[in-house]
Image: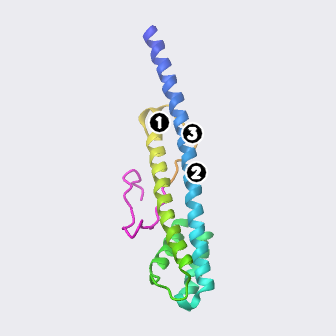
């Protein structure tokens, strides 16, 4: 009886610890998403500014595409944010490095925002991976901890960090 009571007490302590950890991880996912969304919105805004204020530097046709892709990234028409962000990212990568007539501050801000977005994506996906791992543990599933809440999704877009190839290595996300 004493051993049974001890096991129940240990299970309750583990459950409380796990629920606290899950709540903290969900908060981490939410904060990471806010940071990622802020950087992606800023990148789209800077791309719109570049297209609007410097069409001669990027070319009038490319400026129209850039503005359209930036607007779609802010509010995706079809609801697929990842697809819209990838289209904007490709358009930005295809721009020449040295854009005549574009202030260095704008070029620098766009490059910095892109780097911060890549870091924010990495932090977000790390938080999602940790949350999914804890929620998929055998005991968490058995006790149905947080079973009513949807699993957070990875946000896989192509934002290379400092010119490195985009990271698509998510072994925990076999659906992609």
Q: Secondary structure at mark 1?
A: helix
Residue 175 in percent (x, y) is at 42, 56
Circle 2 — which element? helix
Rounded to the nearest angstrom, the CA distance separating label 2 from label 3 is: 12 Å
- The question of residue 175 being in magenta is answered with yes
The residue range painted magenta reads 154-176
The circle drawn on residue 141 is 1
Does residue 36 lie above or below 165 as drawn?
above
Residue that sits furthest to the top in the current view: 1
Q: Is residue 52 left or right of residue 108?
A: right
Badge 2 density bin: few <14, some 14–19, many ≥20, Cα 10 Å: some
Q: Position of residue 130 (x, y in %)?
A: 45, 45
Residue marked by disc 3: 23
Front in this rendered view, residue 92 or 112: 112
Q: Name the foreground residue: 171 vs 91.
A: 91
Earlier in the chain: of badge 2 and badge 1, it is 2
Element assignment for label 3: helix
Residue 107 percent coordinates (x, y): 52, 77
Label of residue 13 in the image: none
Between discs 3 and 1, the one toward the N terminus: 3
């Amino acid at each position: 009886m004493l051993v049974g009571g001890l096991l129940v007490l240990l299970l309750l302590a583990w459950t409380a610890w796990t629920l606290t950890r899950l709540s903290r991880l969900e908060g981490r996912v939410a904060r990471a998403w806010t940071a990622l969304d802020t950087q992606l919105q800023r990148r789209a805004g800077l791309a719109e500014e570049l297209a609007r204020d410097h069409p001669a530097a990027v070319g009038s046709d490319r400026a129209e595409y850039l503005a359209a892709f930036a607007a779609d990234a802010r509010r995706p028409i079809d609801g697929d944010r990842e697809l819209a962000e990838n289209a904007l990212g490709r358009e930005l990568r295809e721009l020449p490095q040295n854009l005549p007539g574009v202030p260095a501050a704008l070029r620098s801000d766009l490059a910095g925002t892109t780097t911060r977005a890549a870091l924010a994506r990495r932090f977000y996906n790390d938080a999602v991976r940790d949350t999914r791992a804890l929620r998929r543990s055998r005991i968490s599933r058995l006790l149905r901890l947080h079973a009513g809440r949807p699993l957070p999704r990875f946000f896989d877009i192509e934002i290379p960090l400092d010119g490195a190839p985009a990271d698509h290595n998510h072994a925990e996300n076999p659906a992609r």
